[in-house]
Amino acid sequence: MGGRFGLQVRVCFRVSAPPGTLRPVPRTTSQAPVAEWKIPLSDVLVEDELLAALHETVASGWWSMGPRVGAFEAEFAALTGAKHAFAVANGTAALHIALLAVGAGPADEVVLPSLNFVAAANTVVHTGAVPVFCDVRSERDLNLDPGDLEAALTERTRAVVVLHYGGYACEIEAVLDACRSRGIAVVEDAAHAVGATHNGRFCGTFGDVGCFSFFSNKNLPVGEGGMVITDDDGLAERLRLLRSHGMTTLTWDRHRGHAAGYDVLEPGFNYRLDELRAALGSVQLRRLAERNAARGDLVRRYRERLDAREGLVVPFADDEASSHHLAVAVLPEGAARDDVRARLAAARIQTSVHYPPIHRFSAFAANRSRPLPRTDALGERILTLPLYAHMEPEQVDTVADALLEALKESGPAAE
């Protein structure tokens, strides 16, 4: 899911708030970030409509999950075409209850790409299942390799978690073909892919369950938050219960007099979304298509400026259907990535890595039974560049020029 590796999200205020609405608080010295980036990795734009939505929600006096969450869920379901949509506290919570809903538990295995945020593997462990990692395709396609995925499946495999890396759809049909005949559930990690489509269908709607993240660096940012979607009525009922302590009714239902009490049908979690973030989400959802398109224009500019220059590769063919969540460059073999990043930081350009492969973390040392040669090689070469919808084209040029210069000046990676 959404990584926070080296991330600083800058907040830009674009407001001319009328009397009676909330105004942004000027940043003081104590509020200033550790480093003032000239070009940050990600940037959140705060505008009048967002502030007005928050003001209205606060003034309503009802802040826990209620009507605004319900409206956000309905709007998200309408966008994706999903039958059911459940807003949750974050993308990790979405994955956790999705895996529990499809039955993952002790003695099971769940296959997933190692090139993802660690939350994906953590949630597998929290169900009691064992994460089994598979490889990616190539430096030009950082999604999972369906062939290696199929090789990783065993009689113990309960589910596969597929990531649409960077907002580019994986070969989901091949994944479904491999899983359906074996009775294996497919959970789509669409944290990067809100608004992305594949063959005319929205990412997140192909598998049994689709999971989204609304973290601050995502395409639909609300701070913390997520969504789970499904067309399966049985899975929907389990997701509904797991999200809120296994309770048959919610506080909002009882507040309105629609229920006098509740039963608990199974042990669940407090993974609910609150009204304030739902209000932000509804506003952000209306801007999603336009902002995804703007991100696409910027990624294309990066590709034009960088691909095949100084040994660089900009993965994925230009895909209008992508959400363009990440702008990733694959450095040439042997490049000293830390040195390149340091040179860019000296120019006040923030970068990150999406992601350090999960199987190389100490916590997952016991899960390294399968060779992942492409993931291991690419894990040393991936570099995430700044990208946000209101980024200026000239800023892309500044980043591209600085990266090319850094590669020329940097030495090879240490052995």
Image (cartoon, rainbow, N blue to C red):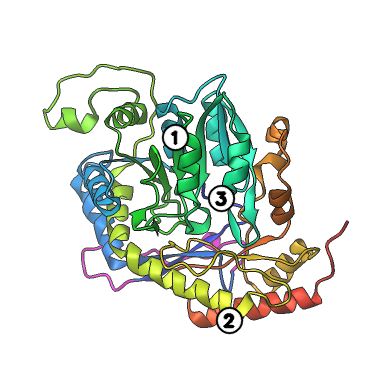
- The rendered magenta stretch, by its main secondary structure, is classed as loop
- Asked where in the image residue 402 lies, by quadrant, the reply is bottom right
Which comes sooner in the sequence, label 2 or label 1?
1
Residue occupying image coordinates x 45% and y 37%: 186
Q: In this view, does 326 lie above or below 369?
A: below
* Residue 291 horizontal side relative to residue 130, left or right: left
Residue extending furthest left? 257
Label 2 to label 1: alpha-carbon separation: 45 Å
- In the rendered structure, which segment of residues is drawn in magenta? 15-36
Q: Residue 180 carries which label?
A: 1
* Residue 269 horizontal side relative to residue 114, left or right: left
Q: In the picture, which quadrant includes the C terminus?
A: bottom right
Q: Nearer the viewer, mark 3 or mark 1?
A: 1
SS for dot 1: helix
Residue 205 visible in the picture: yes
Expressed as whole percent of the image width and height from the top left, the position of residue 194 reads 39, 55
- Asked where in the image residue 112 lies, by quadrant, the reply is top right
Magenta-colored stretch includes residue 414: no
Label 3 to label 1: alpha-carbon separation: 30 Å
Amino acid at dot 2: Asp
Residue occupying image coordinates x 38% and y 30%: 270
Q: Which mark is residue 397?
A: 2
